Image: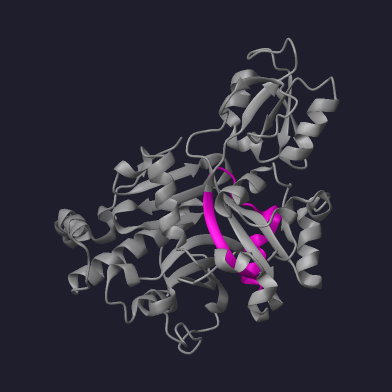
Amino acid sequence: MPEPDLIVFGGPTSQTGTAVRERLEGIDTRWENEAIWKGKSFKHIKKMFCDGKILAVLPMWNSYVGAIEQSHALEMLFEEKAKLYLLWPNEIIFECAGKVGIGLGKIKTLISVDVAEIQCSRFIQEQGAKFLVGNSTTDAFEKFANDSSIDAVLYTPGQNQQRFNVLRKNASNPTNFTTFTLLGSIDSCNWINETWGSLYKKLNPKVGVYFGVQMPIRAVAFSDDQKLLFDELTNGCEAIDDIPEIIFVARRSPDRCGLLVEAKDSILPDGILTEEGYSNEVEVVQGIGETNSRYTEEVFQLFNNKFSGVVRYDFIRHKNVANNICFFACPPLGIVLHGYEDSIVEPVARLVIDKYFELYINGIECTNNERKFFEKYKQAYYEHGMDFINFVDVGL
């Protein structure tokens, strides 16, 4: 049974297309039909979400770029214009190929999708090349192949069908990954099973649920409402694995941020985080989506498989100072928090970890490994509170 038309930004050989083939292996390949994806810009796709029935896979966040605002993915979720059905991270590799006679150190003009300028910044600086922008890696490769003035291209592995000379198998910066999301139009939550076709088995059963919280940006102190929010997130949790996870902190306006929260479907009762008890500074966005996997588990699986050096520390931070991009993680507790400006997101990360220690001291159930971690730092926590945390910078 075929699934409904699925728009995959950039097409089957793009970074998004590569991620879809790996994550949704074996689905009907009608989504690779050029008519479905060709010419679909981010702006066009957003309009399609507003106009009617649609499924689309979009890049949402990158470890060097941060929230990919051009895709409008986070924006549409917080504004309740789309539903989330899948969320997963994928390593991003850019190969580099050149024309005949062009070698490393001789590249004067280099083309790729715009985000590659940041994600491959070390390589580009080493070459001293002028960077040209394509609409996608697919578009960039076509322009490179057809324009004699362009010396080299950064592209997704698999796009080099003409077999241009490969100059570098992976030109990406370290720890380069993108989070992709499968979104459906707002009415998709009412579709019958048959409408989903072969995608239905790929997206079920549901084990993760998502909601959002929008609130003022606070770099240091938290309001009573914001502290109440963190208390309510953990009410009724009997084990560490039950705790809802704040996985993204996104800028929603100059003075407000949005938290995307993931929870286990089995422990999120009806009515959690109602607006009762909050002032108007905290807005709760219910029912953002449901998935058949936990994003936090997928992130650490990626780290263990592709970036094993990252997870050897208990508290880690990856940041791109030039672009105000960061993520924080505590691997022993399965905490990973993607964000933007370091000074805004770090207090949230510390508050989250502080809450875990508070719950441990109050007797929450945990695994033997989690208990060893808590006992390792318990005395430092008693003496210094959340200030005991020392984040180690990784990936840059």
For residue 50, above or below residue 228: above
Q: Residue furthest top?
A: 101
The residue lying at 62 percent from left, 61 percent from top is 182
Does the magenta-highlighted stretch encompass residue 71?
A: yes
Question: In this view of the protein, can residue 224 be seen by the observer?
Answer: no
Q: Residue furthest bottom?
A: 276
Q: Looking at the image, can residue 174 be seen?
A: yes
User: In the rendered view, does 322 fall on the left or right side of 45?
Assistant: left
Q: Nearer the viewer, residue 222 or 153?
A: 153
Question: Which quadrant of the figure contains the N terminus?
Answer: bottom right
Residue 280 occupies quadrant: bottom right
Asked whether 349 falls inside the magenta stretch, the response is no
In the displayed structure, 352 sits above or below 42; it is below
Segment colored magenta = 63-89
Residue 84: x and y in percent read 60, 68
Q: Residue furthest front?
A: 1
- Left or right of 81: which side holds 268? left
Q: Is residue 209 above or below residue 390?
A: below
Residue 43 in the image: state x and y as whole percent: 79, 57
Residue 133 percent across, percent down from the top left: 76, 36
Q: Position of residue 299 (x, y in %)?
A: 44, 52
Residue at (18%, 74%) from the top-left corner? 363
What residue is rendered at 19% in x and 74% in y? Answer: 362
